Image: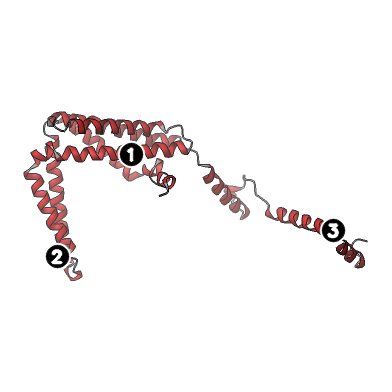
């Protein structure tokens, strides 16, 4: 597995697309919701997930009915699973809010800690002075992960407050990273600069006005120099010199 390629793909600004920016804002609002209603927030969250699963199951069922000629029977299974799991989540939301849901969120915070670590590493490799921002987010996420798994037997109110502080702090840091990268983007890596320079040279050779300020590498001059050096080697050959004298080239 190419670790550097993995970092380049999933780290840094590439992970801060517009869609993820919207997700960060929504999670920030969810953190505020957890702090405002700590006593009911987790149960309401589980109930909302249950409703979403039921809606998704119904949508799969409707899609199967509308396109039943395709024989897409896995949609029937997805519809049944979504509806059943959604109903169970709503019925047993109190138990899930105290046990299963905090575990799921703990796994989520651990995942975000890893993702932020890759982002910090990618920014550091690119030479950005802002690499410490995602590193701070990773530290926050890891600390909250430890707190969650150490307090699984705690009250719903306590767990909601921990998660609320996490969602607010983590997403503020990530939004700050997004804004900072827009204001002061990281410099391109040396390999990136070389490839960009090469493309610009080709563009300059084609008369691209945007690239006229770049130095154009003259490969023809290198070829002429190579030919001259080859001729110099030939001049060291006595037969070749006699051949040129007989034909009057050196007169």
Residue 18 pos. (x, y %): 34, 44
Q: Are marks 1 and 3 in contact (CB under 8 Å)?
A: no
Q: Residues within 10 Å of mark 3 (few under 14, many from 20)?
A: some
Q: Picture quarter containing residue 224?
A: bottom right
Q: Which residue is mark 3?
A: 235
**Which labelled disc corresponds to residue 114?**
1
Relative height, residue 209 to residue 110 (above, below): below
Residue 1 pos. (x, y %): 40, 50
Of labels 2 and 3, earlier in sequence is 2
Q: Which residue is mark 2?
A: 65
**Horizontal side, residue 229 vs residue 199: left or right:** right
Q: Picture quarter containing residue 107?
A: top left
Q: Are marks 2 and 3 in contact (CB under 8 Å)?
A: no
Q: What distance separates the C-alpha of mark 2 from that of mark 3?
A: 86 Å
Residue 97 pos. (x, y %): 12, 38
Q: What distance separates the C-alpha of mark 1 from that of mark 2?
A: 42 Å
Residue ranking furthest to the right: 251
**Horizontal side, residue 218 vs residue 82: left or right:** right
Relative height, residue 143 to residue 2 (above, below): above
Q: Residue at x 18, y 37 (%)?
A: 102
Q: Are marks 1 and 2 in contact (CB under 8 Å)?
A: no
């Amino acid at each position: 597995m190419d670790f550097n390629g993995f970092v380049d793909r999933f780290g840094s600004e590439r992970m801060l697309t517009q869609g993820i920016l919207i997700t960060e804002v929504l999670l920030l609002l969810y953190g505020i919701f957890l702090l405002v209603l700590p006593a009911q927030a987790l149960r309401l969250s589980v109930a909302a997930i249950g409703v979403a699963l039921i809606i998704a199951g119904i949508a799969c069922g409707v899609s199967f009915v509308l396109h039943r000629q395709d024989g897409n029977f896995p949609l029937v299974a997805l519809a049944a699973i979504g509806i059943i799991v959604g109903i169970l989540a709503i019925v047993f939301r109190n138990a899930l809010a105290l046990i299963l849901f905090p575990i799921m969120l703990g796994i989520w915070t651990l995942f975000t800690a890893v993702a932020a670590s890759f982002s910090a590493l990618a920014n550091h490799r690119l030479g950005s002075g802002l690499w410490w921002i995602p590193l701070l987010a990773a530290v926050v996420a890891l600390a909250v992960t430890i707190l969650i798994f150490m307090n699984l037997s705690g009250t719903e109110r306590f767990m909601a407050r921990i998660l609320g502080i996490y969602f607010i702090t983590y997403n503020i840091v990530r939004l700050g990273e997004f804004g900072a990268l827009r204001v002061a983007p990281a410099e391109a890596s040396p390999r990136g600069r070389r490839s960009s320079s090469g493309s610009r040279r080709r563009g300059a050779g084609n008369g691209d006005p945007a690239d006229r300020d770049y130095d154009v590498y003259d490969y023809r001059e290198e070829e002429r120099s190579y030919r001259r050096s080859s001729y110099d080697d030939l001049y060291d050959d006595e037969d070749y010199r006699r051949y040129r004298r007989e034909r009057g080239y050196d007169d």
